[in-house]
Image: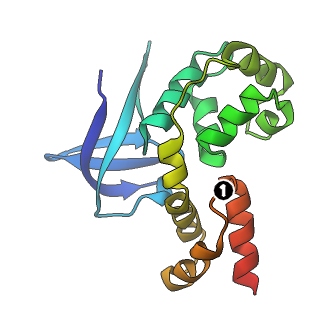
Amino acid sequence: MYNYIKGKLVDQDSSFIVIDVNGIGYQIYVANPYSFELDKEYQVFIYNHIREEENTLYGFKTKEEKELFLRLINVKGLGPKMALPMLATGSVSGIVDAIDRENILYLKKFPKIGDKVARQIILDLKGKLSIAINKEEESSLDELTNVLTSLGYKAADIKRVVPQVDKDLTIENQIKEALKLFLK
């Protein structure tokens, strides 16, 4: 079982990145591949998913993302290919909050998550997620910066707008606020 892989990012695609570690390229499926920069060194937390004819690596920027992913894939009817897009479009704190508040509408906004699966997630995980999200709150502006970069905004414009965004908002609302600030 792998815990993390540390190496240089040498390739990326719409669903995965390739990390070079001592001449071996590991293909790792991640939530937001374009939030990583080519030719930079990263430590990516890993989950090795092994099934009959499948051996796939899933990667995460933080331990909290990995922990939530592991909890989600243990829900009946929810596999890695459904859980990873949840992390791509939602924040760890937002997903945990939605589960604890039984917010089915929030959970149904994710791809392939219908009413039945959303209710199963709440049934299985409500009150059982003790994920430490304090590190995520500290890095929420980093996440916002990565999202805005992946959307094609220039670094100078991002540096001007990000300090004006309310840090207490969810990442989704931070993005909306930042986009409004770009229009000014």
Residue 147, by quadrant, is: bottom right
Residue found 57% across the figure and 62% down from its top = 144
Q: Tell me: residue 159, above or below residue 169.
A: below
Please state which amino acid type lies under the numbered disc 1.
Asp
Residue 32 can be seen, yes or no:
no
Q: Is residue 124 left or right of residue 24?
A: right
Q: Is residue 102 above or below residue 75?
A: below
Quadrant into which the C terminus falls: bottom right
126 or 109: nearer the viewer: 126
Q: What is the x, y in percent for residue 9?
A: 31, 55
Disc 1 is placed on an element classified as loop
Question: Residue tagged by mark 1?
Answer: 168
For the point 85% across and 25% down, the residue is 115
User: Between residues 99 and 89, which one lies in front from this camera angle?
Assistant: 99
Q: Residue at x 82, y 32 (%)?
A: 103
Quadrant position of the N terminus in the picture = top left
Q: Please state the horizontal and vertical placement of residue 71, each as a whole percent of the image.
A: 56, 21
Q: Quadrant of residue 25?
A: top left
